[in-house]
Image: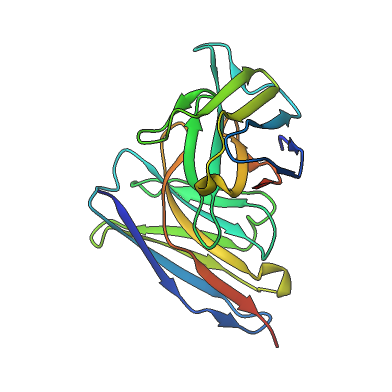
Amino acid sequence: DIVMTQSPDSLAVSLGERATINCKSSQSVLYSSNNENYLAWYQQQPGQPPKLLIYWASTRESGVPDRFSGSGSGTDFTLTISSLQAEDVAVYYCQQYYTSPRTFGQGTKVEI
Amino acid sequence: QVQLQQWGAGLLKPSETLSLTCAVYGGSLSGHYWSWIRQPPGRGLEWIGEIDQSGRTNYNPSLKSRVTISVDTSKNQFSLRLTSVTAADTAMYYCARVSVFGMATYWGQGTLVAVSS
């Protein structure tokens, strides 16, 4: 299985400040035939199911604010919230869909 | 707008069988995978498995011996069975629509399943 490791486990950020979450995969999730990274980011607000934010490592899902951005390739990825809003308090998960079983990181809790 | 509505028993005894169903509204089963994902209390997400419209399945090897995912195209539903449950199977169980590539785009509201004697 591909192991996904996120850092940090939690972080506290002031309103309007930048939040950065890292995700590292135990093997590359870059598919050479299409040059795509099979990596997604999800947001889970308290008491809610996860919500897809970003896929292909950097493509925002429809309706996701542009303060959310994803970057990285191969084994190292980053989710950035450029200006934290109150509604961004949540746990964030990365997920690889390069191979089965699909695996998630352990989650990063973002607080204010 | 696609909606997933799920239901099933929320309290089981050890060794019983977990059974959940997810109904898909506002979209067809074709062209996607349909997945079950679980989340133990206070913990992260674990992918259980998925199925397509034709019934082809893909399971997490860690659960494969106990899991069956099935699809009922006439009702636009898919289901999860997990046999011989233990306390370790206590979790929120989510159904989800998964793209052909593997990202989960729509999620059900979740069903909390507790296993206790």
Q: Nearer the viewer, residue A24 or B63?
A: A24
Q: Position of residue B60 (x, y in %)?
A: 62, 49
- Compared with A26, A30 (above or below) is above
Q: Position of residue A105 (x, y in %)?
A: 68, 41
Spot the residue most to the front. A15
Instruction: Tell me where residue B25 sits by quadrant.
Output: bottom left
At 63% from the left and 52% from the top, the residue drawn is B46
At 61% from the left and 80% from the top, the residue drawn is B16
Q: Position of residue B102 (x, y in %)?
A: 49, 36
Q: In the picture, which quadrant includes the C terminus of chain B?
A: bottom right
Instruction: Tell me where residue A57 sits by quadrant.
Output: top right
- Compared with A78, B39 (above or below) is below
- Compared with B87, B62 (above or below) is above
- Compared with B10, A73 (above or below) is above
Q: Nearer the viewer, residue A68 or A95?
A: A68
Instruction: Tell me where residue A10 sits by quadrant.
Output: top right
At 70% from the left and 58% from the top, the residue drawn is B43
At 60% from the left and 71% from the top, the residue drawn is B83
Spot the residue most to the bottom. B117
